[in-house]
């Protein structure tokens, strides 16, 4: 599998604004934010889509979700509210085929899939 753009960020081959990193996970600001806070939470393991995650990835997926809530707290939006999104494949508008959670907040969000 060739390196995704997010793997290139992990390897520091392209720049990004990193807000969190540990052995398994990196989080950085989205380059085209949809809200005042729009952070991507990404496993260092390159899993293309949610469909490709297996039982072996269950703990990692849990850690990714918990990292979303930790970063929401770090950014001071945990009590106000925020959204966590995974886009999977074409009709959900997935563009980077390296699984990632979008953490979106910092304003009143609407509720529409459009
Ligand atoms: P998705 O459409 O769910 O695959 O989300 C991919 C996200 O990656 C989009 O919100 C893009 O704006 C974002 N993105 C693409 N390239 C970069 C980059 N180099 N640095 C940060 N975010 C990026």
Image: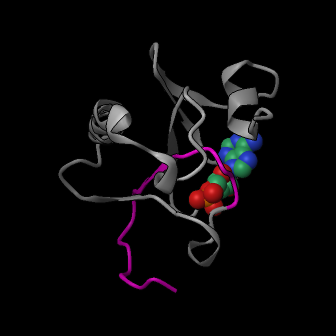
Q: Is residue 28 above or below residue 80?
A: above
Residue under the image location 80 percent in, 34 percent down: 2
Residue lying furthest top: 23
How did the renderer colour the structure?
Answer: one colour
Residue 25 shows in this picture: yes
Residue lying furthest left: 79
Q: Is residue 61 above or below residue 19?
A: below
Q: In the rendered view, does 61 fall on the left or right side of 43? A: left
Instruction: Choose between 10 and 104: the one closer to the eye.
Output: 10
Give coordinates of residue 110: x percent, y percent.
38, 80
Give coordinates of residue 44: x percent, y percent.
55, 26
Q: Is residue 78 magenta?
A: no
Question: How many numbered discs?
Answer: 0
Instruction: Choose between 3 and 78: the one closer to the eye.
Output: 3
Q: Is residue 80 above or below residue 64?
A: below
Q: Magenta region: which residues?
A: 95-114
Give coordinates of residue 21: x percent, y percent.
48, 20
Residue 71 shows in this picture: no
Q: In the rendered view, does 72 fall on the left or right side of 101? A: left
Residue lying furthest front: 55
Residue under the image location 44 percent in, 45 percent down: 53
Residue under the image location 75 percent in, 35 percent down: 1
Instruction: Choose between 95 and 109: the one closer to the eye.
Output: 95
């Amino acid at each position: 599998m060739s390196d995704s753009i997010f793997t290139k960020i992990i390897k520091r081959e392209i720049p990004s604004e990193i807000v969190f990193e540990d052995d398994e996970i990196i989080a950085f600001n989205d380059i085209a934010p949809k809200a005042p806070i729009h952070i991507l939470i990404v496993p260092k393991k390159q899993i293309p889509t949610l469909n490709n995650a297996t039982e072996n990835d269950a703990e990692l997926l849990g850690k990714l979700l918990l990292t979303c809530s930790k970063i929401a707290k770090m950014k001071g939006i945990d009590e106000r509210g925020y959204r966590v999104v995974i886009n999977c494949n074409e009709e959900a508008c997935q563009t980077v085929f390296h699984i990632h959670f979008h953490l979106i907040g910092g304003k009143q969000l609407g509720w529409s899939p459009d």
